[in-house]
Each structure stands twice: as structure tokens, then as C-alpha cells.
Amino acid sequence: MEKKAGQCGRVDGLLSERMRRTAALVTRGNRTADVGCDHAYTSIYLVQHGIAPHVIAMDINAGPLARAKENVVRFGMEGQIELRQSDGLAALAPEEAETILIAGMGGPLAERILSAFPGTLAAVKELVLQPQSEVAEVRRFLHRAGFCITAEDMVSEDGKYYVMLRAGHGTEEPWAEEEYLYGKRLTADAVSVLGEFLKEERVKTEALLQELALAGTEKSVKRREELLLRLEQNLCRMKAL
């Protein structure tokens, strides 16, 4: 007899705010592929909260998948979460999922995973991404790949800032550089977090500019020019909040 989620407790307390907010960007009712699922807590959360009726949880490594299987059984999710060992999207057929979720990876790796399977990318309805680095380049990649960024979120957690994105097929006018750097479609909660981030970045940038002014090398001069431009973009985005 299949166990119900309620019989096994809730996974909420095992997930960080970052991952709960990432999961919240998935469109309710979409079959979801959780790429790089690790312990599968996000997959379980999606099902328990009625966000996704079915999740394909995938990871390239056998170890995380073994832990994921233990958790799927522990929370009674065997009938709703399917586990697959997969290098990126290799084990996902086109149209098996309506949402592809990739969280906790560097931006360049997420781009490589998505770019390697253009057929699957074309068939999916939406992408939910939480890149750990190079967020601006991820935004540019989405536009190049024919996606429109429909929602963004941002949280501060353990002294770090994290950005989450949702994108669907479509085209839009290129964003201003400060929008690629800092986002354009942030939720109301995320706007205040971005304001904190911009203030912290500005303080750090101004301090670094003072240090570089004393160096006087050709390399330091070039770096100062880059930072002065970044500071200008920071201030421009702050004014738009």
C-alpha cells in the first residue's frame, strides 16, 4: 500500500529558504525535472506542497541518488518521484517535463547542461534556475536561447545573496546592462534584498577603488576603470528601485 506524504511528516524544515523560494517559482501543476537533485528534498517539497504532480529527480552521481532514494521512500513519494542517474538532461526525453529546475550549480555549468540538449530545451515550457555564480551571464544566455525572464527572486542567507529566475519561451528587448547585472523582474520581497546587496557592493567597491588608486600600476588603472563602471551601474539600478 502506497504511503501518503502526510504519514511521513513534512520536508519543509530540511530545506533552506533559498530552496523553498526556488521551488515556489515552479508553475503549479507542471511535471518537473529536478536536475542535480542531490538529496531530493526539493523534489519532495514540490510534491508535498501540490506544486508538481510528478518529479523526475536526476543526478550524475550514484551517491546522491542513493540518498535521494532513501528520502523518497522515507517520505512516501515512490509513486510521484522518479529517480534517474543522468549527466545533465541526458536521461530526460523531450516533453517528459514541463519545468526544468536547476539549482545550486554555477551559472556556466547550468548553461552547458541546457545547451547540450536543444531538443529538450525547445520542448520544455519553463526553466527555474538558481545559479550560484555569473547570474548576469545566465540572464544573457536565456535571452540568446529564446527565453523571456518572467520572474526573479532574491534572498540573503548565511551572509550570501542568492538569485532565482523563472523563464519561458519568448523574446523581449535586450535589457540594460544594470538589469542584466542586478535583475529587472524582482518580487516585492526581493527588491528590499537587492537594495541591501547594492549598498554592500557599493561600500566594498569604493574601498577597493581607494586601494587601487594607491597602486598606480597599469593593471590597477584598468581595474579601477572596470570598478568605476560597475559603481555607475550599481547607482543606476539603485535609483530605479
Image (cartoon, rainbow, N blue to C red):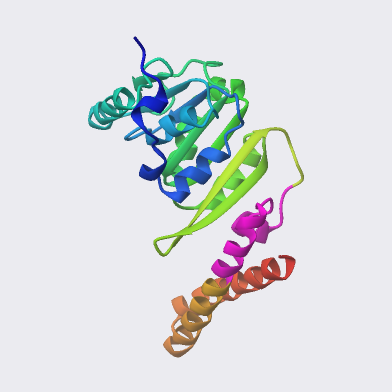
Q: Residue furthest front?
A: 7
Q: Residue furthest top?
A: 1
* Figure quadrant of the N terminus: top left
Q: Residue furthest right?
A: 173
Q: Position of residue 61 (x, y in %)?
A: 27, 30
The vertical placement of 111 against 235, above or below, is above
Secondary structure mainly formed by the magenta segment: helix
Quadrant in which residue 79 is drawn: top left
Tell me the magenta residue range: 174-198
Is residue 146 at all visible to an observer of this figure? Answer: no
Q: Position of residue 33 (x, y in %)?
A: 47, 26
Q: Residue furthest bottom?
A: 214
The question of residue 184 being in magenta is answered with yes
> In the image, what residue occupies the spot 54% across and 67% down?
197
Nearer to me, 180 or 228: 180
- The answer to whether residue 214 is left or right of residue 70 is right
The question of residue 188 being in magenta is answered with yes
Q: Position of residue 82 (x, y in %)?
A: 39, 18
The vertical placement of 27 against 179, above or below, is above
Quadrant in which residue 80 is drawn: top left
How many circles with numbers are drawn on the protein? 0
Is residue 212 at all visible to an observer of this figure? Answer: yes
- The answer to whether residue 34 is left or right of residue 180 is left
- The answer to whether residue 10 is left or right of residue 71 is right
- The answer to whether residue 28 is left or right of residue 89 is right
* Figure quadrant of the C terminus: bottom right
Nearer to me, 9 or 158: 9
> In the image, what residue occupies the spot 46% across and 29% down?
48
> In the image, what residue occupies the spot 64% across and 60% down?
191
Q: Position of residue 195 (x, y in %)?
A: 61, 67
Nearer to me, 220 or 63: 63
